[in-house]
Image (cartoon, rainbow, N blue to C red):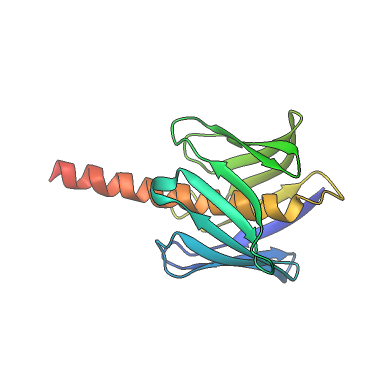
């Protein structure tokens, strides 16, 4: 098992991915609520994009603009599927607070994520249980991108509730 760490301030537009103390990647949004981001992981560049209202998330190779993966997120269903290189991976949100989520392949967890902060969700871990998987970088980044978008949606719902109560 390999363990990575990620950090992102609540009102920041950059997420850092590290192995021990060494930064190995990042995701940077134009601003806190942007639907587009640029990412790097182990020297490889990616583009990430979200359709309006979170329904569709996409990741592209930044060098040739080719689509690597696209996933439809249903906020009321904790599981979503993505097809990458002909392989089906399942994303599962593991709790109501969205502080634990995982990628599965053939029913087995291959990547797990955990947010260590209850309210701010600004840092956490990524545990990788597979080796030599060509889809690994895409899955790691897509999992973190999904998480960020879900947090934004939760903040939006909280604002709606607050305004409804006023």
- Residue for point 69% across, 69% down: 63
Q: Residue 26's image quarter?
A: bottom right
Place of residue 117 in the rendered image (x, y in percent of width and height, measured from the top left): 51, 52
Q: Residue at x 80, y 43 (%)?
A: 129
Residue displayed at 45% across by 68% down? 12
Q: Is residue 119 above or below residue 83?
A: below
Count up the numbered dots: 0
Left/right of residue 90 with respect to residue 96 in the rendered view:
right
Q: In the displayed structure, does residue 18 sit left or right of residue 13?
A: right
Q: Residue furthest right?
A: 132
**Residue 55, how many percent across, how many down?**
45, 43
At x 63% / y 59%, what residue is drawn?
Answer: 60
In the displayed structure, would residue 89 be above or below residue 36? Answer: above
Residue 91: image location, x then y, percent: 62, 38
The quadrant holding residue 66 is bottom right
Q: Is residue 11 visible?
A: yes
Q: Residue 116's spot in the image, x, y percent?
A: 57, 51
62 or 73: which is nearer to us? 62
Residue 15 appears anywhere in the view = no
Determine the image quadrant of residue 105: top right
Closer to the camera, 71 or 29?
71
Along the line of sight, the residue nearer the viewer: 122 or 67: 67
Residue pushed farthest left?
166
């Amino acid at each position: 098992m390999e363990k990575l760490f990620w950090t992102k301030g609540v009102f920041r537009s950059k997420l850092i991915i590290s192995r021990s103390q060494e930064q190995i990647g990042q995701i940077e949004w134009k601003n806190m609520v942007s639907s587009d981001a640029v990412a790097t992981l182990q020297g490889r560049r990616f583009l990430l994009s979200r359709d309006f209202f979170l329904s569709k998330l996409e990741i592209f190779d930044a060098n040739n603009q080719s689509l690597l993966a696209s996933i439809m997120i249903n906020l009321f269903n904790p599981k979503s599927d993505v097809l990458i290189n002909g392989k089906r991976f399942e994303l599962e949100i593991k709790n109501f607070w969205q502080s634990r989520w995982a990628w599965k392949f053939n029913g087995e967890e291959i990547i797990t994520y955990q947010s260590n902060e209850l309210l701010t969700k600004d840092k956490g871990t990524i545990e990788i249980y597979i080796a030599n998987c060509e889809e690994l970088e895409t899955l790691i980044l897509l999992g973190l991108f999904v998480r960020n978008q879900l947090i934004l949606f939760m903040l939006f719902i909280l604002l709606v509730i607050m305004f409804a109560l006023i």
